[in-house]
Image (cartoon, rainbow, N blue to C red):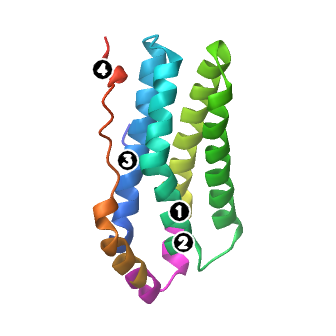
């Protein structure tokens, strides 16, 4: 079976690259859980990734890419951004099996969200937004290129075998 590849508008490829890192984030959570890594260690990583990467990525998408429109697909993405933020905040109140379950749910939520944006929302926006709008977005994203996603987390629990 072949995976469908998506040709992305050049101006927003940075956002798609960041989505790749978000999917890797989900893989790391799942891999850690599968290998019985202490949920507290994984939770600390989630909080790191949220503060260093995901929160800024969401803000960037909303400010630069979603702001010109407010249709139901954009509204869904914004709702999911808020939901993911709430779920991450809730992690601090959980322990044990409840924390493990919430981490699994979070990985699914982020993964599904990224796939929605890549497969549905971005192609939709590429169809309805003007070339000028994309050029403006591209200029702003280039200005913020130095703040691209990075993951320098020290505790690489996902490498445990």
Judged by depth in the image, the label closer to the viewer, 4 or 3, is: 4
**Picture residue at 44% right of the left edge, 32% below the top:** 45
Locate residue 65, reporting x and y percent.
51, 72
Give the camera-side residue of 91 and 133. 91
Question: How far apart in space, not on screen, are marks 3 and 2 (Cα)?
Answer: 20 Å
Asked if the residue at tag 2 contacts the one at tag 4, i.e. Cβ–Cβ closer than 8 Å, the answer is no
Question: How far apart in space, not on screen, are marks 4 and 2 (Cα)?
Answer: 35 Å
Judged by depth in the image, the label closer to the viewer, 3 or 1, is: 1
Vertically, is 112 above or below 119? above
Mark number displayed over residue 20:
3
Q: Within 10 angstroms of label 1, few (less than 14), some, or many (20 or more) residues?
A: some
Q: Between disc 4 and disc 3, whose residue precedes?
A: 3
Asked if the residue at tag 1 contacts the one at tag 2, i.e. Cβ–Cβ closer than 8 Å, the answer is yes
Vertically, is 134 above or below 94? below
Q: Between disc 4 and disc 2, whose residue precedes?
A: 2
Q: Which residues are magenta?
A: 122-135
Q: Between disc 4 and disc 1, whose residue precedes?
A: 1
Residue position marked by numbered label 2 in the rendering: 63
Q: Which quarter of the image is occupied by the C terminus?
A: top left
Residue position marked by numbered label 1 in the rendering: 59
Question: How far apart in space, not on screen, are marks 2 and 1 (Cα)?
Answer: 6 Å
Residue position marked by numbered label 4 in the rendering: 159
């Amino acid at each position: 079976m072949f995976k469908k590849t998506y040709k992305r508008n050049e101006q927003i490829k940075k956002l798609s690259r960041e989505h790749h890192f978000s999917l890797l984030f989900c893989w790391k959570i799942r891999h850690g859980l599968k290998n019985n890594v202490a949920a507290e260690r994984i939770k600390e990583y989630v909080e790191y990734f949220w503060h260093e990467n995901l929160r800024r990525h969401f803000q960037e998408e909303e400010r630069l890419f979603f702001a010109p429109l407010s249709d139901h697909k954009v509204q869904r993405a914004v709702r999911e951004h808020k939901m993911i933020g709430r779920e991450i905040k809730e992690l601090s109140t959980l322990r044990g099996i409840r924390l493990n379950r919430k981490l699994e749910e979070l990985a699914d939520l982020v993964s599904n969200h990224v796939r929605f944006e890549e497969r549905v929302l971005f192609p939709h926006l590429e169809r309805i937004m003007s070339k000028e709008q994309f050029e403006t977005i591209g200029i702003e994203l280039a200005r913020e290129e130095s703040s691209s996603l990075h993951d320098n987390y020290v505790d690489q629990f996902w490498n445990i075998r």
